Image (cartoon, helix red, strand yellow):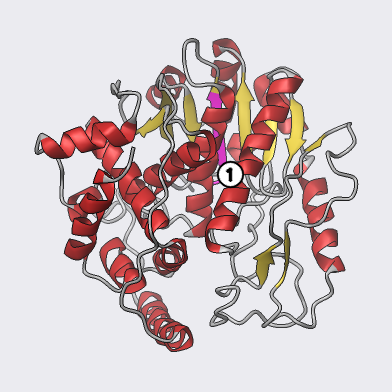
Amino acid sequence: MRIFFARFCASVLSASVLMASVPVFAGEAEDEEVTARREKEARDKLDAEKKSKKPPAVGSKDNPFGTEKADPDAVDISKFTGKTPDAPATPNAPFGNNTGTEINPLCPSCKGMGILPNLPYKPYTKIDGQASSSPDFAPPWKYCDKCQKSMDIKLISEDMKQRQQQALEHKQFEQFAGKPLAAIETPFVAIHSQLPAATNKLVANTLEKCVGILQANSKSMVLVTTRPDTDDIIMLADQGTYDAYIDKAMVQNDAESRNLSKKSTGVSAFHVHMFRLVSPGAPPESRAVFGFGQMLMRSTTDNKAKPWLVEGFAAYCENATLGTNQNYTFTYEKTDVKFEKNWTEQMKKSVKEGKMKQWLEIFNVDMSHMKPFEYLSCYSIVSCLIKIDPIRFDKFVQLVRDGEDTGPAIEKAYGRKIADLQTLWLQWLQNQK
């Protein structure tokens, strides 16, 4: 049995803000292959230790929900989307039916993904019933030229077609909504929408723009592991349809959980993000790319990322793609948080006013009753880590995926102590606009 638990999303009005570029930070580093080998040995040891431990007893302090595994974010996707919860493609098996060369987890080129982005990225969207946006479409990724030399590039196209066909399981979404929904696909997510065609196209193009930015940052596929057969964004136009969807999708939840979902403007979980339009409020493309950012980080880390990292990365994706910050997440109880138009400038003010928290405190926030400067800190820290070195950020999230706690993972990836990185962040922040 799995208990449904979701994070609730809200939108705020905000003007645009663009992040300035900064010099790349070069911390102490060692040979990448040596580092990868050492980290793999540590991961193998950690996995062995985990397997030797008995799971917590049902109802114990470590397992209060009575589930087989203590996992507060566990979501039965089949109940929320109607899809069969097949095992999603993992970072080490991105094609599902890959039977070719074994992927090398130590490969410094693809970082153990087995694939590399085709750059510059060419956006691709497909609306069900219409021709694709690019008949001469080239796959968004290719096999790693170092560890996957023998693989046939045709397998990628075949895999993408198979995933798109599976993503067309669309009737369940319409049954939950009680209304017809448009089906739109990108290589990374399926969209189910009650909104106008022009809006759907804008949202899909915005998500593809986000993917292009993430791939261009580190020249890798580490941060883009979602796929349209396993990951969904649901966009609804009105409160009535939104309420009806929640009642049908969350029928096994208590009334309190459903009511809280209805009071929010959206619900976000491991493989799904759903929202309704709010006027005045953030536009659909803003809502979608924020939720997409949450889904990407959860997928990349196998749902092991702490709330601060999921929230901060989602805010970064929205800002990097649209130049705005108009969304935030809360849990358990609806929270109305007021933000200024420019989150970076507001973060600077918070620091001057002494509201700043140590990074180690931010790493343990639980999204419940968070203060504005805590949201701003999540966004600012993630933005800083990506801007100063996106390649090290990839390594950081992979360490999180492999079971490392936030602090040690950052220190290993960036080659500096948390205190030193926090000092660097404060210096970096003062140069942002």
In this view of the protein, can residue 369 be seen by the observer? no
**At 82% from the left edge and 56% from the top edge, which residue is drawn?**
138
In this view of the protein, can residue 408 be seen by the observer? yes
Question: To which quarter of the image does residue 327 belong?
Answer: top left
The magenta region covers 270-275
Give how far across and how far down residue 157 sits, in percent.
84, 60
> Secondary structure of the magenta portion, mostly?
strand
Front-lying residue, 179 or 217: 217
Label 1 element class = helix
Question: Is residue 66 rendered magenta in the image?
Answer: no
Residue type, label 1: Cys
Front-lying residue, 120 or 8: 120
What residue does disc 1 label?
A: 210
**At 44% from the left edge and 69% from the top edge, which residue is drawn?**
395
Q: Quadrant of the C terminus?
A: top left
Question: To which quarter of the image does residue 156 belong?
Answer: bottom right
Give how far across and how far down residue 215 sits, in percent.
59, 56
Instruction: Check the image and name the residue furthest to the left.
Output: 354
- In the rendered image, the vertical position of residue 151 relative to residue 365, given as above or below: below
- Label 1 Cα crowd, 10 Å radius (few <14 / some 14-19 / many 20+): many
**At 72% from the left edge and 65% from the top edge, which residue is drawn?**
96
Give how far across and how far down residue 347 sits, in percent.
24, 36
Give how far across and how far down residue 217 sits, in percent.
53, 57
